[in-house]
Amino acid sequence: MSRVAHPAGPRHAEVLPPEHPPPPPPDVNALDPAIWPRTAHRAGGALVLGGVDVRDLAARYGTPLFACDEADFRSRCRDFREAFGGDAGVFYAAKAFCCRAVLRWVSEEGLGVDVCTGGELEVALSAGADPAMITLHGSNKLPDELARALAAGVGHIVVDSFDEIDRLERIAAGNPAPRPRILVRVTTGVEAAAHEFVATAHDDQKFGFSLASGAADEAVRQVLDSGVLDFAGLHSHIGSQIYDTAGFEVAAHRVLELAARIRESRGIEIDELNLGGGFGIAYVAGDDPADIKVVAQNLRGIVEAQSRAAGLVQPRLTVEPGRAIAGPGTVTLYRVGTVKDVDGLRTYVSVDGGMSDNIRTALYDADYTCVLASRESAAPPLLCRLVGRHCESGDIVVRDAYLPADVAPGDLVAVAATGAYCRSMASNYNLVPRPGVVAVRDGGSRVLVRTETTDDLLRLDAG
């Protein structure tokens, strides 16, 4: 087997056409602080996270493995809380990554929790989250989930359809719990996302009530007239991986126009305006998300200006970051199994995980950054494709990766910014057990979610 280093960049047109000169290859040993966890550095050539050498993590827990930098996660919670201030609400979107320890961190740092299923709700409650600081989302909440939310006393329920309003009315009518506080989810027609599957505010999709059709106005009317539901305000979520606040400005303007109509027709002001989440993070060099302090200042200014223009009492602003808190502080550790040069066309570096622990590359065409983690190397950069172990051609982790040309079986490779939507969307495809999650902090490590075993898989097989 021969492998060829390509220090000048991509070597075939399907990656970068010749008419577009490729950028110079990166320093394969460097760690871009915009992409890697805040404590990440190299010591003795190896990647260190939270004071722990990743070689020790791999030896103790095995690979693949999600390593979560607890200090990084907590610091990003504080960044949001401090940026938005005490009069705004910050609710961590648990769908990004949900386990009891993480939701305890969230609560301890003063944030609420946004859940979208009964399972996430139970994890939040079992983690000790204050029910009043929990918001329940979901486009098709089951009756049992709604009943559980009412019994637990969750702070808000975001209604998403007329069927759900009817369902919630029936459950609330026979429930001794206090009337649930309701946010009506509005689709504003603003599309702010890099991929159609993560754009959530255009009209042709499953979430919320359309402003353009008048459905949002009708949904508010039904909630107000129900007699058993307590209308709290309006909700809007415009997409994911958003790098500026321009889309939020348009969305806020349109939602507050609805708020003005509610005041004119019903004589009431909305208490709360929830602008959702979707705040972007850096996955690769060149990604440039706005500083959260700037985002918060802009969003607060937008709500203040738009409320003033509409003659409204300024509602309480609420946001729901998930990826921006969980994403950057976690890396996935893999062990290299094979390195294959395919007829000089491309080098494939195969690892012991893949699309079962990171479906985002296949699903969203997502990009990631990876490094050789178990050692440094003086070898020239090799443009390769980091792939997984599954029986799918689309089983790609990093489509265009620069690794040292001497990358070899047994090496550890780390993929950055995998804390959001990787373990959450993990599967057992090809009956591969899902990786565990460990927290690292101050030189120590502990299991948050244990690695599955084949015994776990067989335990569910009733045959």
Image (tube, grey):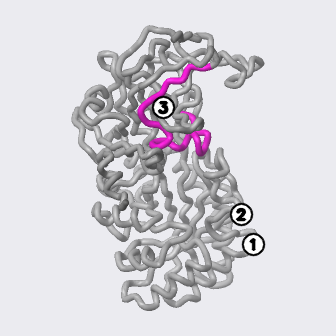
- Residue that lies at the very extreme toward the right in this rendered image: 19
Considering the numbered disc 2 on the image, is that residue within a helix, a strand or a loop? Answer: loop
Q: Image check: 395 left or right of 92?
A: right
Per the model, the C-alpha gap separating discs 1 and 2 is 9 Å
Where's residue 51, x and y in %? 27, 30
Depth order, front residue of 316/16: 16
- Residue that lies at the very extreme toward the front in this rendered image: 463
Q: Image check: 292 left or right of 38?
A: right
Considering the numbered disc 1 on the image, is that residue within a helix, a strand or a loop? Answer: loop
Which labelled disc corresponds to residue 213? 1
Considering the numbered disc 3 on the image, is that residue within a helix, a strand or a loop? Answer: loop
Q: Residues within 10 Å of mark 1 (few under 14, many from 20)?
A: few
Q: Which residue is depicted at the point 44% across and 63% down?
A: 115
Where's residue 446, x and y in %? 24, 42
- The answer to whether the residue labelled 1 contacts the one labelled 2, judged by CB atoms less than 8 Å apart, is yes
- The answer to whether the residue labelled 3 contacts the one labelled 2, judged by CB atoms less than 8 Å apart, is no
Amino acid marked by disc 2: Asp
Which stretch appears magenta?
346-368
Amino acid marked by disc 3: Ala
Q: Which residue is mark 2?
A: 203
Where's residue 240, x and y in %? 58, 49
Depth order, front residue of 244/460: 460
Amino acid marked by disc 1: Ser
Per the model, the C-alpha gap separating discs 1 and 3 is 42 Å
Q: Which residue is mark 3?
A: 34
- How many marks the image carries: the answer is 3
**Earlier residue among tags 1 and 2:** 2
**Earlier residue among tags 3 and 2:** 3
- Asked whether the viewer can see residue 69, the reply is yes
**Earlier residue among tags 1 and 3:** 3
- Asked whether the viewer can see residue 51, the reply is no
Q: Nearer the viewer, mark 3 or mark 2?
A: 2
